[in-house]
Amino acid sequence: MKEGIHPDYHPITIVMTDGTRYETRSTWGKAGDVLQLDVDPKTHPAWIGGVSYRKTGQMEKFKSKYGSIGGGASATETKAAASTDKKAVPAEAKAENKKAPAEGKKADKKTGANT
């Protein structure tokens, strides 16, 4: 094993944002140094669920796209209404669009054109 290639691993004191202190070993600083944390699991939004989507504009973006959550149509109701509007063509209208072949002519099965 080579000598002198590993960093010094020594005891330090960690101070959390609420003042809690604990000792651990680290390669940071020198032996006996104090590491003061600005962000830790007790205060960071990723751990405590405090991300405000109003500040990022994501809630407004969602509401403008899908409507308000508390009132109005839900996203599933909006999607269901949109899909039924597209499929709301009556069978009679579909039948009128298909023309019968002229007398004496046969309709091509692939294209529907009269030959």
Image (cartoon, rainbow, N blue to C red):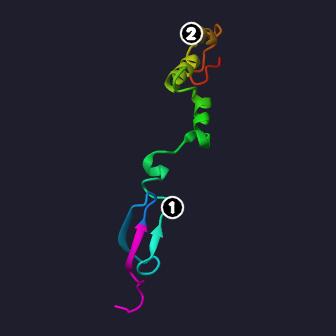
Query: Where residue 51 sits in the image (x, y, percent)?
Result: 52, 45
Q: Mark 1 points at which residue?
A: 38
The image shows residue 20, relative to residue 32, as above or below, that is: above
Q: How far apart are marks 2 and 1 (CA)?
A: 65 Å
Q: Which circle, 2 or 1, is nearer the viewer?
A: 1
Query: Which of 65 and 40 lies nearest the eye of the viewer?
Result: 40
Q: Quadrant of the C terminus?
A: top right
Q: Do the residues labelled 2 and 1 touch (CB within 8 Å)?
A: no
Is 50 on the left or on the right of 101, as rendered?
left
Q: Residue at x 65, y 9 (%)?
A: 102
Query: Which of 75 and 57 lies nearest the eye of the viewer?
Result: 57
Q: Which image quarter: residue 26?
A: bottom left
Q: Which residue is drawn at 57% across and 7% down?
A: 92
Q: Please report the bounds of the magenta region as a residue range.
A: 1-14
Query: Where residue 41 sits in the image (x, y, percent)?
Result: 42, 55
Q: Which amino acid does label 1 sit on?
A: Asp
Is 70 on the left or on the right of 16, as rendered?
right
Q: Which image quarter: residue 57?
A: top right
Please state the total of marks drawn on the protein image.
Answer: 2
Q: Does the magenta stretch include residue 71?
A: no
Q: Which image quarter: residue 4?
A: bottom left
Q: Residues within 10 Å of mark 1 (few under 14, many from 20)?
A: few
Q: Quadrant of the N terminus?
A: bottom left
Query: Where residue 87 sits in the image (x, y, percent)?
Result: 55, 17
Q: Name the residue under label 2.
A: 90
Q: Which amino acid does label 2 sit on?
A: Pro
Secondary structure state at the residue bearing disc 1: loop
The dominant secondary structure in magenta is loop
